[in-house]
Image (tube, rainbow, N blue to C red):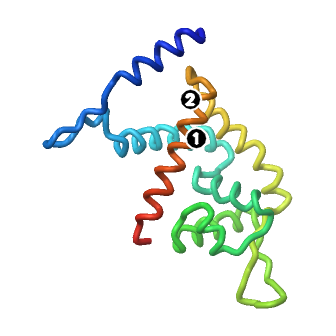
Amino acid sequence: MSENDGAVADAKQTDRTVAADADGHALDDSLGFLVNVIARYMRAALEERLKEYEITSTQWVVLQGIAESDMMKQTELGRRVELDNATITRQVDRLEQAGLIRRNQTDEDRRTQLISLTAKGRGLLPKLNEQANEVNRIARRRIRTSRMNRLLADLRLIHDNLRDNSSH
C-alpha cells in the first residue's frame, strides 16, 4: 500500500459518518460490537498459537503482568491485569502448579505473598510473547504506524472513560 493509498483510505474513513438514529445503530457502526468481535478474533488466534505451550491467553496476560513488575502481590496483579479475585486466584494456582510462578512470603506479613516468575516461566515468556506479537502483526496489517498509534491512544481513553464510570 502506497502512502497515497493510505491517504485515500483515511479520507474515505473520515468521510464516512457514524450512523446513529433514534432507533439505534447498525452493528458495523457500534464501537462495543466491533471491539467485542475483534477481541474474540484476537483471543481465538492467540489461543490457537498458545496451545502447544499448554497456556491460555489469560495465563499469558498474568505471566506478562508479573514480568513487568518482577514481583508483586496477588491483589496488585489482579488490578494490573484487570481480573477479579476469583479469576486471578485460579490462574495463579494453575501457573504455580505448572511451575511457571512461585508465591513468596514477605517478612513483614506472612499472610502477604509476592508472586514472581520461576526460571521456567522466564524462559517460556519470550516464546509466548512472540506468539502474541504475531497476532498483533496480523491485526495491524495495512494500518500505518501513525494511525495505529492514534487508535491505541483512543482505545486507552475509552478504557479510562469506562473504568472511571464503572461501579467495580
**Disc 1 element:** helix
Mark 2 neighbour class, 10 Å CA radius: few under 14, some 14 to 19, many 20 or more: few
Which residue in the protein does label 1 denote?
46
Q: Earlier in the sequence, mark 2 or mark 1?
A: 1
Residue 140 occupies quadrant? top right
**Disc 2 element:** helix
- Please say if 14 is above or below 70: above
- Please say if 141 is above or below 160: above
Quarter placement of the N terminus: top right
- Compare residues 75 and 10 and report the one nearer the observer: 10
- Compare residues 60 and 159 and report the one nearer the observer: 159
- Compare residues 69 and 166 and report the one nearer the observer: 166
Which residue in the protein does label 2 denote?
147
Instruction: Please state if 16 lies on the left or on the right of 157 as rendered.
Output: left
Residue at x 63% of width, y 75% of height: 75
Image x and y of residue 89, in percent: 59, 72
Residue at x 54% of width, y 74% of height: 85
**Gap between marks 2 and 1, in whole Å?**
23 Å
Residue at x 53% of width, y 37% of height: 151
Image x and y of residue 160, in percent: 50, 57
Residue at x 67% of width, y 37% of height: 133
- Count of residue discs: 2
Q: Tell me the amino acid under the disc marked 1.
A: Leu
Q: Tell me the amino acid under the disc marked 2.
A: Arg
